[in-house]
Amino acid sequence: MLDKRFIRENPQAVKDAVAVKGLDLDVDELLQLDQDNRKLQFEVDEAQARRKSFAKQFAKADEARRAELRVEHEAFDHQLKDLREQLARTGERLSELMLLTPNIPWSGAPVGPDEAANVVLRTVGTPPEFDFTPLDHTELAEKRGWAEFARARKVAGERAYALVGDLVMLERAVHSYALDLLRTREFTPVAVPALVREEPLIGTGMLPKAREEIYAIPEDDLYLAGTAEVALVGLHAGEILDAARLPIRYAGISPCFRREIGSASRDVRGLLRVHQFEKVEQFVLCVADEAESARWHAELLATAERILTDLGLCYEVVECATGDMGVGKFRMNDINTWFPSLGRFRETHSCSTLHDWQARRANLRYRDSGGTIRFAHTLNNTAVATPRLLAALLENHQTADGAVRVPEVLRPYLGGRELI
RNA sequence: GGUGGAGUCGCCUAGUGGCCGAGGGCGCACGCCUCGAAAGCGUGUGAGGGGGCAACCCCUCCGUGGGUUCAAAUCCCACCUCCACCGCCA
């Protein structure tokens, strides 16, 4: 969400953002509604003031005067009710549109309608070369008895999987390693609810835009979150934090659920695109300073890169285009990891700065040293998301005899084993 | 799941229809006092929206949403959350 005052003063910037992000939002309608709304607000305020003085007169009046006042009030009351209804209507429509206002993307973002316009900033590491025919992760996992697909689908439908044996231990190792690394960087581990209410989904910007991507449990008015970010922002929604508490750094862990409606019948095989997965998420809540959040963005990105380097994986860092970054984002960098079976890079991490767009929705503020209340900046990036990252580890570190070399950083979590 | 109780300005609390335009205490800030501090005394101390060039003014908010009334923190209804006890349960 943007500041109404900003929209009023910079309508063109908002229209440009709508255009480069490929959105459908009538900014002029929004401006008109905003104007109407303020006019109505003024009229209601005036009427309300009259009503208050009315009630006061009434309290002091004798019975005869009261009878008169009652008659006068009745006419006036209709008017007030009518104004209130009008205000409620425009207010409702206005907030609907406000929830659709995009963040203004940073000037360095490539302009383009989708990921085809993304720009690769750097490639780190080299894809492995095999002197044997490598298996894809699905074949390898099945060969080693590390996953159940057919049986899992009996239980949970398409895209379902069950990890088995050493692959479970590897998943745990990857998560433990990521959490430990983040703890050394003063990120507090938080295990958050994945089952969430509507408010935090609106607060983070997942709703109303991505409704079809989210599992809903209507009996209980709950949803399954697609990322820990939902709960992490939600934890502080509505609060006014003391600036001394910032920056807040969380390593959020949670199961993540995605309906993958937009990707129906893509990547249905294996562990690349699943409905339920596990993620360690990096999250930062900091003061509303562009330089400050830019520094955190760089650090979140660097940490993710460090993780991939530690895991011995080859990756590329991408500057995401305006049309790919999503409504709320100021800047987004994806990290794509090399998958031998695909012969290309696939997204494993996504690093985003939202400026105060998310904080405005979640009403998440802080009091700065001068006592001024401001909306905070929020940022997030994947640390590790499995099983997609496990698939990368299997494929990149496989040996000729169907084993997988364990990256050194994971060995302490696997009883020192070099191979699984 | 059942029964009972509760949710007020950072914290504690007063407040059963008009004097609440929300009182008090704690905390905090500033001032006085002091060599300095503590104590004491005094003053101030929520958020959001709107109007005006401005000093300033107005409106909304007492968990949330409805309702009753000329008038609601206060009465009614629903929901949310918390507490206690009972039942069930990984």
Image: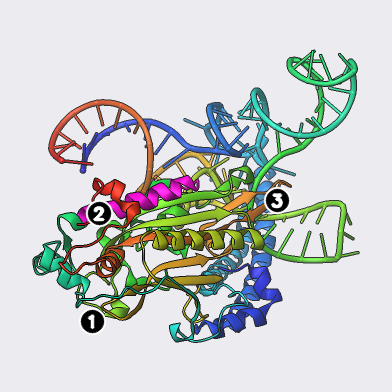
Q: To which residue does mark 1 refer?
A: A265
Compared to residue A183, the image places residue B6 above or below, namely: above
Residue at mark 1 to residue at mark 2: CA–CA distance: 36 Å
Of pointers 1 and 2, the one earlier in the residue sequence:
1
Is A227 included in the stretch rendered in magenta? no
Q: Which labelled disc corresponds to residue A418?
A: 2
Please name the residue shown 59% across and 78% down the image.
A30
Is residue A309 toward the left or the right of residue A42 in the image? left
Of pointers 2 and 3, the one earlier in the residue sequence:
3
Q: Position of residue A96 (x, y in %)?
A: 50, 72
**Quadrant position of residue A5:** bottom right
User: Callout 1: few (<14), some (14-19), or many (20+) C-alpha neighbours within 10 Å?
Assistant: few
Q: Position of residue B89 (x, y in %)?
A: 14, 39
Q: Which residues are magenta?
A: A168-188
Please name the residue shown 50% across and 45% down the image.
A186
Front residue of A191/A409: it is A409
Going by the numbered disc 2, the residue's amino acid type is: Glu
User: Callout 2: few (<14), some (14-19), or many (20+) C-alpha neighbours within 10 Å?
Assistant: some
Front residue of A158/A199: it is A158
Going by the numbered disc 3, the residue's amino acid type is: Thr
Q: Are marks 2 and 3 on the same chain?
A: yes
- Mark 2 or 3: in front is 2
Is residue A398 toward the left or the right of residue A211 in the image? left
Identify the secondary structure beneath mark 1: loop
Kindly report the secondary structure that dominates the magenta region of the rendered protein: helix
**Quadrant position of residue A311:** bottom left
Residue at mark 1 to residue at mark 3: CA–CA distance: 51 Å
Of pointers 1 and 3, the one earlier in the residue sequence:
1
Q: Are marks 1 and 3 on the same chain?
A: yes
- Mark 1 or 2: in front is 2
